[in-house]
Amino acid sequence: AQSVTQPDIHITVSEGASLELRCNYSYGATPYLFWYVQSPGQGLQLLLKYFSGDTLVQGIKGFEAEFKRSQSSFNLRKPSVHWSDAAEYFCAVDPVGSSNTGKLIFGQGTTLQVKP
Amino acid sequence: EPEVTQTPSHQVTQMGQEVILRCVPISNHLYFYWYRQILGQKVEFLVSFYNNEISEKSEIFDDQFSVERPDGSNFTLKIRSTKLEDSAMYFCASGQGSSGNTIYFGEGSWLTVV
């Protein structure tokens, strides 16, 4: 079945430490890939996206993500986490070749806690 | 930066009542969406809307739900007779194109059904 998996439900890192949030998908073709962030009480803000081309994409707030076709992964990274990065992070997929309606499939989210 | 705006930010309603959630998508966008997030669960697609008609809907989007673009700027989600399980955050979103284009989300409307 088509799905998006974020294996880590909850991650805690120290401020200044590096961060990697995992995302795996299972689709036949390479989908379009997104990372969104949701701060408490806020909506979903787009961090970055991958459609094609360079597999390492840069986003806002110092985030980057790398698409690895062989692993069906699109992991989000940040070299040095700030306290304000504490939020919930969602990986999402737009399956190319689906009904072409721009419907996103979301992972279950990873909650990031930042220790001072 | 243009944004999707939603009202109300929070609504409490009694079971069986009708609710209308309102959204103003980004002005040059052509595709509109509603998603829902039940507390502690995934964000789920409800419906997409293009050219004044529904282009796709999920199994969740049953006869109790409807969407409308009553004028050139608003996009609404109506729940005819709310149930307790409709309690969720409802996100409106819009995009310029269909598959592969970036979808921008509003801040959400919290619906609590009591």
Image (spheres, grey):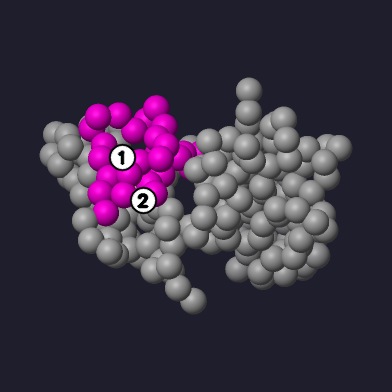
Contact flag, marks 2 and 1 (Cβ < 8 Å): no
- Nearer the observer, B16 or B58: B58
| Residue A22: assigned label | none
Give above or below for A6 relative to A59.
above
Image quadrant occupied by the C terminus of chain B: top left
> Percent x, y for residue B83?
23, 32
Q: In this image, B84 relative to B5: left or right?
A: left
> Percent x, y for residue B62?
30, 29
Instruction: Give the amino acid type for the residue marked by disc 2 in the picture.
Output: Asn
Q: Alpha-carbon neighbours of circle 1 within 10 Å: few (<14), some, or many (≥20)?
A: many
Label 1 residue SS: loop
Q: In this image, B30 relative to A111: left or right?
A: left
Query: What residue occupies the far front of the structure in this picture?
Result: B51
Label 2 residue SS: loop
Residue B15 visible at all: no
Residue depicted at x 37% and y 62%: B25
Residue hosting label 2 = B51
Residue hosting label 1 = B87
Magenta stretch prevailing secondary structure: strand
Residue A28 visible at all: yes
Instruction: Give the amino acid type for the residue marked by disc 1 in the picture.
Output: Ser
Q: Nearer the viewer, mark 2 or mark 1?
A: 2
- Nearer the observer, B29 or B103: B29
- Read off the chain for label 2: B
- Read off the chain for label 1: B
Q: Quadrant of residue A96?
A: top right
Magenta region, residue range: B42-69
Residue depicted at x 45% and y 40%: B45
Judge whether residue B105 is colored magenta: no
Question: Exactly how many numbered labels are in the figure?
Answer: 2
Query: What residue occupies the far bottom of the structure in this picture?
Result: B1
Q: Alpha-carbon neighbours of circle 2 within 10 Å: few (<14), some, or many (≥20)?
A: few
